[in-house]
Image (cartoon, grey):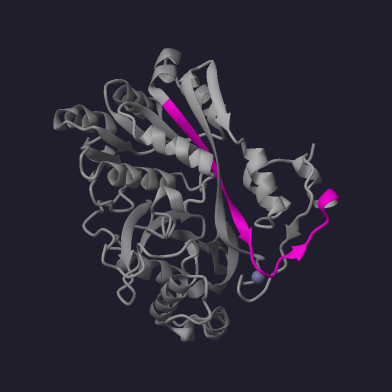
Amino acid sequence: MYRIPVGKKFPNLGRSGYHEQSFHPKDDMHDTRTSTNTLAEWEAFLATLDGGTNSAVEFVDRLLALVDQAPASDVHLDPTETALELRWRLDGVLQPLGAAPRAIAANIVGRLKVLAGLLTYETALPQEGRLVNETSGSEFRVSTFPTLFGERAVLRALGASASGLDSLDKLGLDAQVLAQFQTALAGNTGAILVVGPAGSGKTTTAYAAVREVVRQSHGGRAIHSLEDPVEVVVPGVAQSQVNEASGFTMATALKSLVRQDPEVLMLGEMRDRATAETTLQAALTGSLVITTFHAGNAAEAVQRLVDMGIPSYAVGHSIRLIVAQRLVRRLCECALEGEPTRDAAPLGVDVKRCMGPAGCERCTGTGYRGRALLAEVTATTDLRNQSTTIPFLSAATSLVEAGATSPSEVIRAFGWRRE
Ligand SMILES: [Zn+2]
């Protein structure tokens, strides 16, 4: 993929709230800094748009202000035959956010490209850059992609997914799971794999894990990261961004990095055989490695690595712990009592009680506010000897019984279906 080099600006550590944000950082979107940007006012603004080209600048300003106040992780701008459709991701699920007239679609995307330092005349190739909202200091990764009706753009709020989840004990892990995780992080060798599907918060957990290492070691361990791209700055870690296009690949970087006397390595997602091989090799040769991998659970992760062509002895000997995880949305206070026998039937387990989503102003009508992490930990001594602490299903069941989430949300997050 064609990529514009980024990296001149990283999240400003002094930025207010970056570290202190609660689990659900920006949830009171109706009484925060600029009350001029409520969802109702946004909708009213959209209704006034008539396609005048100068409205693109105001559109982008208002959009950034709106996103700043909501707990949205992404905004999608999709050109169609008749309009520029907008959606935003709230607590992991895309929700509609209105539309702009077709006539200014290209200007809006163009404005985002200007702010992100992209080439405005280049519309036939994907591009990627960083945008800083000058008013609030918040940062977004902007990526564009050519489609039939023009360029679509996606804004990803940087650091937002990690907000408030900056240490392991804040992730909401079960005490037993947390203890096992912390023990593994105190080790000297082996790989700790954080696995889950896209959008399950793997990166957030990996960053929390590396912060835990920094905290535990009080500067006494040499900690390095090789990332693609660096998403969050972690004090105490020598962070580097790999760049496949310029030849600074994971493999070449690691070859030189071993001369830098590293003890703990956080490595970007194992996307292919080459990165998996390199990563697991590092874990076998005297470093503790924290990495992420796309797989549903521990067994699937092991199987996928073997399928990729990694020898099973290498998989068995290098992996110390597999943390499989999902994010489920938390029910808003407006939740209503559900009917356990009916609602929880697709889960295949008996629950004593459950709640379901309703929808109010506080949750912008979705019925959910904030998210909870579900994780199962599998310790691997060798391929045949795996032990899982608190499997997903029992963790999910207790969350449902506590009224924290709904059966339908668990089914959505896990992709479980009625048999
Ligand atoms: Zn609500």
Q: Quadrant of the C terminus?
A: top right
Taking depth in this image into account, of 415 and 18 the one nearest to the observer is 18
Q: Main secondary structure of the magenta part?
A: strand
274 relative to 241, above or below: above
369 relative to 382, above or below: below
Q: Position of residue 182 (x, y in %)?
A: 40, 38
Total residue callouts: 0
Q: Residue lying furthest left in this view?
A: 259
246 relative to 330, above or below: above
Q: Is residue 289 left or right of residue 162?
A: left
Q: Quadrant of ligand 1?
A: bottom right
Q: Is residue 240 visible?
A: no
Taking depth in this image into account, of 61 and 209 the one nearest to the observer is 209
Q: Is residue 99 visible?
A: yes
Taking depth in this image into account, of 194 and 154 the one nearest to the observer is 194
What residue span does the magenta drawing correspond to? Answer: 320-341
Q: Position of residue 403 (x, y in %)?
A: 69, 57
